[in-house]
Image (cartoon, rainbow, N blue to C red):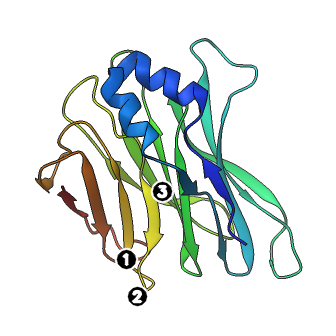
Amino acid sequence: MHLFKSVVSLGAAVAVTACGGAEGQGALTTRKSALVTGTSQGCTFTVSSAPRQPGPFPYIFDITVTREASATCPWSASSAVVGFSNGTPSTVSLAANDLGVAVSYTYRTGGPSPQQLGIKHVAPDTLAITRSTGLYFNALGKFIYAGDLSIEPDGMTLTVSGTKNAPLIGETGSGDNYVATFPDFFTSETAPSIVAF
């Protein structure tokens, strides 16, 4: 059974409103939930974002992938931190199949840095990161609000969709919505095509 997590938390709304104004808040209210659990090679994986404890201020939010133990999973329960965000809660998403686990998370590096999107390919057996990529801006103070992941029927193509408030590096089209398509995500380093609308 898939688990869903609301990404419209009070903390996220306050953080984005403080940094992105009413426009940021409006974009957040259109998002309802993101898929945060998936199955690969008989194992259930979950991604989460939580403040590092004990942590500095502003807080660092760690992005953690957790593998559950079960009768169908050949490996024991385990978890690994795959990224972090400095001072701002992350919205997270996960998609998985037998080729691997894909995770996305919004993050900032601090100060007036833009909120970008990290995307990782996590190996089901070791939880090691086998590919690290993302979607980015060339300007300060801009926001990617989320990157919802899905795997296309071919089992190889990863699709990332969400909202933003400025043009992404490499995008075509224009608008506050985007879809990024990564062909052969689990087996290559092929760059995505990004369409805004």
Residue at the far left: name it: 173
User: Which image quadrant: the N terminus?
Assistant: bottom right
Going by the numbered disc 2, the residue's amino acid type is: Asp
Location of residue 123 in the rendering, given as x and y in whole percent from the top left corner? 59, 67
Residue at the far top: name it: 57
**Foreground pick, 74 / 32:** 32
Q: Residue at label 3?
A: 120
Say whether disc 2 or disc 3 marks the residue closer to the N-terminus: 3
**Position of residue 10 in the picture relative to residue 78 (left or right):** left
Location of residue 20 with respect to 97 vertically, above or below? above
Q: Residue at label 1?
A: 157
Going by the numbered disc 3, the residue's amino acid type is: Lys
**Position of residue 142 in the picture relative to residue 12 (left or right):** left
**Position of residue 177 in the picture relative to residue 153 (left or right):** left
Q: Residue at label 2?
A: 154
Identify which residue is drawn at 19% across, 34% down. 138
